[in-house]
Amino acid sequence: MIPLSVLDLVPVRQGSGPAEALAETALLAQAAERSGYKRFWVAEHHAMDGVAGGATSVVLAHVGHATTTIRIGSGGIMLPNHNPFVIAEQFGTLDALFPGRVDLGLGRAPGADMRIAQALRRDLARVSELFPQDVVELRALLSGEPNLGIRATPGRGAPVELWMLGSSLFGAQLAAALGLPYAFAAHFAPDLLDQALQVYRRQFRPSSALDRPHVMVAMNVIAADSDEEAVLLCSSMDQSFVALRSGNPGKLQPPVPGYRQSLPPTALAMLEHMRQASAIGSPETVARTIAQFVERTGADELIVSGATFDPAARIRSLALTASAVA
């Protein structure tokens, strides 16, 4: 059985708010732990009514206290938004709270627009150029090698598992050069998946953290008792993608029967394109689709994304998926 993990955006449903979303994320993490998932990651997004995971390290502390064994981590921290020293302290603190359970996935995309960049007091054009340097600095702050003359406390010596995230060739090349495990965001940006994995594996240089390439790929997965039910549940996520690409993101909406059939051809084509890395259906359909995807990518791990309007349906989806893959 390929290891499975969960990527959660802490979705805020129509008619509810961040408090409910955070409570539902904790329940989802507990369910993932019960079903044998390896990791539970939260992604950093800002100023979106439908996403409550902006303060990622705080959310991870909440998830950590709700669970006991599952690894918790960022999928990811968008490093251009942050000072590496502060992130070292935050994730060092998480490791002190939850020893041996903390992952730190790093991304180069800001997860925000220029207005948010100004609010964060960041020059995104400049700090994006410095991303490789910041990753090296952050790794040194955590490992103590080389000695930068300043100690992150907590942080230094914390065995935080560092990951490079990406949806392009840049992240693949940087992960390979630094000898880090690599996670590809195929769930929303599938175009360069195969090429990026080839680049990463071909250019990989062993490091003290990793002696050979290690790949995790993200895909959208929603399992239900039947294909028809899964497609209906997925319509909430479909609405979110269409709204985001239309420049009008909002809260997660209730499912709509026949939603895809109601879309104009351009919106439907966009949705189908983004859904290339997806397994939506009955346990049999999900198992077959995941097996084909693993064969195509040679992934060492999979991390499943996806949201349903009914939190109980998402919990059931995780259980059905784990059983189907097993």
Image (spheres, rainbow, N blue to C red):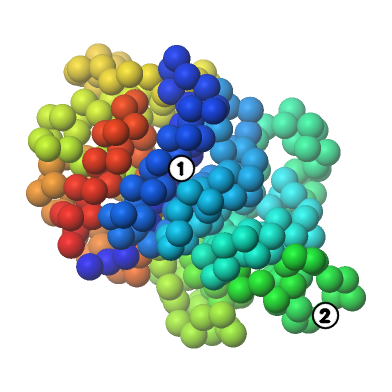
Q: Secondary structure at mark 2?
A: loop
**Residue at left offset 68%, top offset 53%:** 79
Left or right: 73 in relation to 292: right
Nearer the N terminus, badge 2 or badge 1? 1
Amino acid type for the residue under numbered disc 1:
Ala
Seen from the viewer's position, the closer of residues 264 and 158 is 158
- In the image, residue 38 lies at what x, y percent? 38, 62
Residue lying at 44% horizontally and 76% vertically, measured from the top left: 213
Can see residue 42?
Answer: yes
For residue 159, which quarter of the picture? bottom right
Q: Is residue 130 above or below residue 7?
A: below
Which residue is denoted by mark 1 in the rendering? 26
Query: Among all residues in the image, which is located at the extreme right?
Result: 149
Q: Tell me the residue that label 2 is attached to.
A: 147
| Res 227 → quadrant | top left
Q: Quarter holding the C terminus?
A: bottom left
Residue 262 position within the rendered picture, expressed as x and y whole percent measured from the top left = 25, 14
Tell me the residue at 70%/76% (across/down). 157
Mark 1: secondary structure: helix
Q: Residue at (41%, 48%) from the top-left corner?
A: 29
Q: Is residue 161 left or right of residue 120?
A: left
Can you give x and y, in whole percent of width and height, for residue 104 in the image?
Answer: 58, 60
Quadrant containing the N terminus is: bottom left
* Residue 75 visible in rendering: no
Image height check: is 179 above or below 241? below
Along the line of sight, the residue nearer the viewer: 197 or 90: 90
Circle 2: residue type: Asn
